[in-house]
Image (tube, helix red, strand yellow):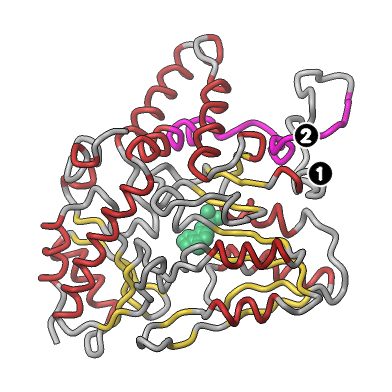
């Protein structure tokens, strides 16, 4: 395993450090040098020799294994799709829904995990149950797990779909507990992992996850539009592919025989030519994180976000999301009781070259492991005081 300290504050590995205190990895992350180099190398090879010089499909097979390793899956359970939405849609449109089927999620999901279910509701008469956020005993905003399980207990509930980490509060759900419940009670369980994969350990077996989807452009530090989709082996045959083309089948190179038999592994969800440059960039950044160790990367993010929270609170800001054991994430969501948030974000960007975001009426800062303590302190110092 490589040493995290070689990467922290290292502008060669993370060129964004040269000009920005960048804290929006929950939005679109800057790609790391490893990802950029891989894509540059592809551009060179593709221009000079095309497929005659290099077998990129072999690299993609390595990525399939690495991605599986990161989430405790088998390579047969991994497909490359173009983003998180496509993976969730693959689940939504891969099943036959009956009128009155219930789908449970939260009322604070990113739309990628809402609209596919709304479409299922519209087209098949399913009912979408959105469990709302509440204020917990510590004054933090969170969707209580008991309420999610209560909604899932409806005998008509067929599927629960949750973000591992909620985009606007940073709440991390107890995925293992929900997975346990769903498996024991015959419900499907789908996880949007874009706000956690790469920085919070995931074990699809231990967490009893049936489907998982994540693009590489946030915490995984890869380019946009190259993502992974996991489908539990036992569900592969039961999940009809959303898109069909020449590649879903067992012998895609047998062009003329039209032997339409789907692959038995997750390759059945891949319909045609891959986004090779994107996936090669994704491979480089994912393997860098895997080499550093997801656990270690997460602990570093925990330390940085703790520091940020302490600083923000000392300047009079209210922290929104829960931060207890097993609840924290890389997203720090906070509010100013006085200053307009859009002005804060604008001033930080323009005057200080500090990047944070604004989501759902909250300020949102999401540092990655390579950010430094000095950068966090600069952000805290630049926040208008109360
Ligand atoms: C929880 C969550 N899911 C999905 C996405 C993005 O979806 P996609 O990868 O389809 O663009 C985001 C982006 O902000 C997100 O926060």
Instruction: Identify the residue at image location x=63%, y=63%.
Output: 180
Q: Is mark 1 within 8 Å of ligand 1?
A: no
Q: Residue at x 70, y 52 (%)?
A: 90
The quadrant in which residue 26 appears is bottom left
User: Cα distance, mark 1 to mark 2?
Assistant: 7 Å
**Horizontal and vertical percent position of residue 222:** 41, 42
Count of marks overlaid on the render: 2
- Using the image as rendered, state which of residue 84 and residue 344 is in the foreground: 84
Using a 10 Å C-alpha cutoff, classify the residue at mark 2 as few (fewer than 14 neighbours), some (14 to 19) or many (20 or more): some
Q: Is residue 156 above or below residue 208?
A: below
Magenta segment, which residues?
258-283
* Residue 182: x %, y % from top left: 69, 65
Quarter-of-image position of residue 303: bottom left
Report the residue at 43% width, 42% height from top: 223
Query: Which of 250/186 is in front?
Result: 186
| Pointer 1 local density, CA inside 10 Å: few below 14, some 14–19, many at least 20 | some
Cβ–Cβ under 8 Å for marks 1 and 2: yes
* Disc on res. 127: none
User: Which element type, helix, strand or loop, lies under badge 2?
Assistant: loop
- Describe residue 140's horizontal placement relative to residue 229 as left or right: left
What x and y, as percent, mark residue 164?
51, 62
Instruction: Judge from the rendering whether residue 252 lies leftward or rightward of residue 165; answer left or right.
Output: right
Q: Considering the numbered disc 1 on the image, is that residue within a helix, a strand or a loop?
A: loop
Q: Is residue 261 magenta?
A: yes
Q: Which mark is residue 237?
A: 1
Query: Which residue in the protein does label 2 denote?
Result: 264
Q: Earlier in the sequence, mark 1 or mark 2?
A: 1
Image height check: is 279 above or below 230? above
């Amino acid at each position: 395993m490589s040493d995290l300290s070689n990467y922290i504050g290292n502008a060669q590995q993370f060129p964004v450090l040269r000009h920005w205190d960048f804290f929006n990895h929950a939005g679109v992350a800057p790609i790391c040098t490893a990802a950029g180099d891989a894509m540059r190398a592809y551009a060179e090879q593709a221009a000079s020799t095309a497929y005659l010089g290099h077998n990129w499909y072999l690299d993609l097979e390595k990525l399939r294994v690495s991605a599986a390793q990161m989430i405790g899956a088998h390579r047969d359970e991994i497909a490359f799709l173009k983003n998180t939405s496509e993976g969730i849609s693959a689940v939504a449109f891969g099943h036959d829904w009956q009128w009155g089927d219930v789908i449970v999620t939260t009322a604070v999901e990113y739309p990628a995990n809402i609209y596919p279910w709304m479409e299922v509701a519209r087209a098949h008469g399913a009912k979408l149950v959105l469990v709302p956020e509440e204020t917990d005993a510590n004054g933090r905003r969170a969707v209580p797990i008991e309420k999610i399980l209560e909604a899932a207990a409806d005998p008509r509930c067929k599927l629960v779909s949750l973000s591992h980490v909620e985009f606007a509060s940073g709440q991390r759900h107890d995925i293992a507990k929900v997975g346990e419940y769903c498996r024991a009670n015959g419900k499907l369980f789908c996880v949007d992992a874009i706000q956690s994969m790469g920085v919070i350990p995931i074990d699809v077996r231990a967490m009893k996850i049936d489907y998982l989807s994540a693009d590489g452009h946030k915490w995984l530090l890869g380019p946009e539009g190259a993502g992974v989709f996991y489908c539990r082996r036992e569900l592969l045959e039961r999940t009809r592919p959303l898109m069909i083309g020449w590649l879903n089948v067992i012998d895609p190179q047998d062009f003329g025989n039209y032997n339409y038999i789907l692959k038995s592994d997750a390759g059945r969800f891949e319909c045609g030519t891959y986004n090779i440059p994107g996936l090669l960039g994704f491979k480089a950044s994912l393997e860098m994180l895997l080499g550093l160790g997801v656990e270690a990367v997460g602990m570093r993010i925990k330390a940085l976000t703790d520091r940020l929270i302490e600083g923000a609170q000392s300047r009079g800001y209210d922290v929104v999301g829960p931060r207890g054991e097993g609840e924290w994430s890389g997203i720090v969501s906070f509010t100013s009781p006085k200053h307009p948030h859009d002005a804060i974000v604008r001033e930080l960007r323009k005057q200080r070259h500090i990047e944070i975001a604004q989501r759902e009426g909250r300020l949102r800062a999401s540092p990655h492991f390579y950010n430094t303590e000095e950068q966090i302190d600069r952000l805290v110092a630049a926040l208008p005081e109360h």
